[in-house]
Image (tube, coloured by chain):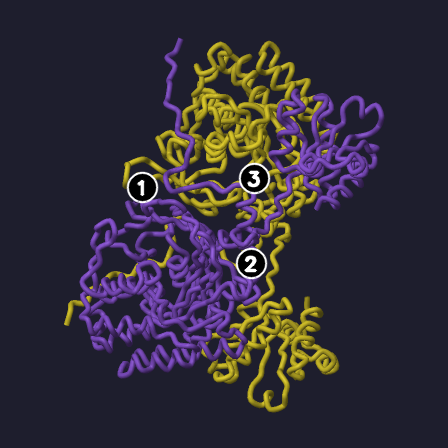
Chain colours: A purple, B yellow
Amino acid sequence: MAKVKKQPRPKAEPPKGFRDYFGADVAERKAMLDRIAEVYHRHGFDPLESSAVETLEALGKYLPDVDRPNAGVFAWQEEEDGGWVALRYDLTAPLARVYAQHRNDLPTPYRRYAMGPVWRNEKPGPGRFRQFYQCDADTVGAASVAADAEICAMLSEALEAVGIPRGDYVIRVNNRKVLNGVMEVAGVLDPADPSKFEEERGIVLRAIDKLDRLGPDGVRALLGEGRKDESGDFTRGAGLSEAQADVVMGFMDARREDGPATVARLRELVAGSAMGAEGVDELEEIAALLDAQGYGPDRIVIDPSVVRGLGYYTGPVYEAELTFEILDEKGRPRQFGSVAGGGRYDDLVKRFTGQAVPATGVSIGVDRLLAALRAKGRGQADSMGPVLVTVMDRDRMADYQAMAAELRAAGIRAEVYLGNPKNFGNQLKYADRRGSPLAIIEGSDEKARGVVTVKDLVLGAKLAAEITSNEEWKAQPAQEDVPRGDLLAHVRARLGRDG
Amino acid sequence: MAKVKKQPRPKAEPPKGFRDYFGADVAERKAMLDRIAEVYHRHGFDPLESSAVETLEALGKYLPDVDRPNAGVFAWQEEEDGGWVALRYDLTAPLARVYAQHRNDLPTPYRRYAMGPVWRNEKPGPGRFRQFYQCDADTVGAASVAADAEICAMLSEALEAVGIPRGDYVIRVNNRKVLNGVMEVAGVLDPADPSKFEEERGIVLRAIDKLDRLGPDGVRALLGEGRKDESGDFTRGAGLSEAQADVVMGFMDARREDGPATVARLRELVAGSAMGAEGVDELEEIAALLDAQGYGPDRIVIDPSVVRGLGYYTGPVYEAELTFEILDEKGRPRQFGSVAGGGRYDDLVKRFTGQAVPATGVSIGVDRLLAALRAKGRGQADSMGPVLVTVMDRDRMADYQAMAAELRAAGIRAEVYLGNPKNFGNQLKYADRRGSPLAIIEGSDEKARGVVTVKDLVLGAKLAAEITSNEEWKAQPAQEDVPRGDLLAHVRARLGRDG
């Protein structure tokens, strides 16, 4: 006999940091994305689904906190020509490539939305996955900050459309030009040669972005020589002097009681910087546009502490934060925090074309927003299991299938049990696991009498739990024989009562 | 001054064989998948979205026509542990991994559907991409061929739900066991040691699967010594004798005028093979189940020429073919062909668990089915562009945004022009490119009179094209001044008329 080749069994698990989504999770996410898409569509945005794989050079290196080349992305070499390709790490870099490629065929401005998975080659951790969904809306080709204001307003509409009520979220708006102006005033940035202190500027940006997590002292340390964390790891700082750091800290703290007061305070801080003044003007214009449309400070506010970590923003930046409290792992209340962010990135398309193309847009963290909806009990999927037609007589599968087909034709979710039908208890256990509201039973006895038995599993479970009186049991029987011809009407009535 | 680093501009294109989907294409696919999902859901199937990245060992090597190890998949090594991971090439191999991993938490049988992109590292060609959508439905854990019959019936429902009418498609069903039986009778397969002629068996399978493309002579050559194609490339054959090849060719030709006659013919062909008899019994049972539910030969037929190319099928196989004609690249009529296929694969889960787990399922070729719907003029996306609020006065953006917001609040797709408003002609050109039905105009003159001008772009284009009489023009003006307060009512009425 031939030698039997024996291979070791493969492990039944996905690679580290990847996961699967089942049933209600998939349905809930889809319901949420459908609602967001509806808002985007109504605002004139068109869907775009770009390739998941891009050339590495087209993607560029825009991930925050990345020192090694190509770190953070999943990349490999093409067999044929040795070129490097990679999975997209966000939906913005691909948009820049798509717009540069198709700009002659696309309307200007081009408003588009995109939803789909992105991949990050990062160290996985609890709740931190290497594949996750993003949901973006961007306007390419519009220089006016009216485009930024529109994105902020639309983000507000989208959050309310999925079930985050007004008062439970706030959208904070800032402007990178104001921060750059502040850094000019402090001498961290040279207006004659902005590339000079590029590295320091990046460190300042990322330090401010971590205010929530590190607190003012931590940020202050990162503005200066650097910071040692609890584990003893040292992060190099921007090397600012005390006086320079004071100016930057003052910027983060510039929010006042209302928009006009904050704007006035920012004007003081950037006095002498042309770029800073431009940034404050833009903030003022965005605020005026939003106020006029009724997006008051209960929904959208100017907040200088928002800077966003990504390197490519050039003007307005914005962030949506959920303000209600949830309990953290240790049971302590904390604010839910950021679920979306974005801003203006006028130079991304220029990489391809050499010509500046203004662009602005927002990205919603889909998994975080879903988690927020669940935390508020607002997951919206229809989780009802199918009506189960049980199998009493193996030779009568066609009859059982006909029953299920009859229910389905009336729009009722229904299925025939397809496991081994020998043990009837297993069929009911299966119905339980599926969340079936009803089980239909037609054995030879029922068949002979021209009836089917309808077992109400929801009511049955309720009655069993509540131990009601005999009268109630009789008034609301959890199981009933009905003429075969009345099956559909009876099932409809039962589902109406339970639903 | 610091040295200016200059990098070459990246090319604005996706890697070879990848593409992007815009606007209506995305919307049409989504509409189609939503309808299919609705059918699957109603049949009791639950959605599953598994990770796009799998370990290479979990994926296994099941692509057809693949000789080199790992050919056909995009794979790379993990940085941390050097393990090989890859993009999924279909949705079946991941399902086997998911079921093996979570089998204790999943119902048995587990009915699931999945929709999403898969990736193949193949040579791209015209209309042949390396990323494409699949849409699968599978039942895992059901040994009964009632599960296969259910999948076939559901596939029929799904095709009709998306707009393929009865008569324009046929689902062909066959059984690998019958083919194996035929090969036993011909002496190509040794029932005592089925692994013995594994390679020859694979060649026979793939040869039969190419009947459409190669014709009987081409298949016959592949059953024998081999075949030289037009380019002179030689494909090695299975090495069957004349008599053996006759038996196999007779199998492909075994379809008779109706199901019972075909079954009778198949019984003759497999006489003496236990496995062949089992296969014919299963086919007969499937046909009986489907007939009893009204899925007659106008929708589902037994056809021995269907074998499917994939190696992992173990029992019933099925394929949906669209029977209407389209014109090929050269303008010749040809049948549209296959849009979905599947079958029973009882050994895929066993790879992980060591225990046999029966499974059966179908995969719809999403892009091909969409192409078919378009060929029949049944693309179903709402392609109406947004109502465009034009910008006559830059300082009044907030007013224009308020108009758009008013329309959107009433469910009407609307946007404000966000390009440079200087040239009004550009705004109308933009509206045209967007497919806008209406443009709203409010300059200082209109503002002073308390009106807005509504320009009906659809009607305008129609009138311009038809050159109608003056009376008609007056009766149906393409442009009208309406009081600002009547804007919404007027837009509603216009859209009702045009829609």
Residue at 24% from the left image edge and 54% from the top image edge: A229
Tag 1: residue type?
Glu
Q: Note whether A71 is above or below B483 in the view shown.
A: above
**Which picture quadrant has residue A402?**
top right
Q: Secondary structure at mark 3?
A: strand
The residues tagged by marks 2 and 3 sit, at their Cα atoms, a distance apart of 25 Å
Residue at 42% from the left image edge and 81% from the top image edge: A260
Q: Secondary structure at mark 1?
A: loop
The N terminus of chain A is located in which quarter? top left
Tag 3: residue type?
Tyr
Which x, y percent locates residue A27? 56, 47
- Position of B322 compared to A115: left or right? right
* Viewer-closest of B98 and B491: B98
* Viewer-closest of B492 and B51: B51
Task: Tell me, yes or no, if residue A296 can be seen here.
Answer: yes
Mark 1, other Cα within 10 Å: few <14 / some 14–19 / many ≥20:
few
The residues tagged by marks 3 and 1 sit, at their Cα atoms, a distance apart of 33 Å
Which x, y percent locates residue B109? 59, 29
The numbered mark 1 sits on a residue in which chain? A
- Position of B249 compared to B255: left or right? left
The numbered mark 3 sits on a residue in which chain? B
**Which picture quadrant has residue A420?**
top right
Q: Nearer the viewer, mark 2 or mark 1?
A: 2
Q: Which residue was labeled with disc 2?
A: A162
Q: Note whether B340 is above or below A362 in the view shown.
A: above
Q: Which residue was labeled with disc 1?
A: A79
Residue at 56% from the left image edge and 39% from the top image edge: B113
Q: Secondary structure at mark 2?
A: helix
Tag 2: residue type?
Val
Which x, y percent locates residue B58? 41, 32
Residue at 29% from the left image edge and 45% from the top image edge: A81
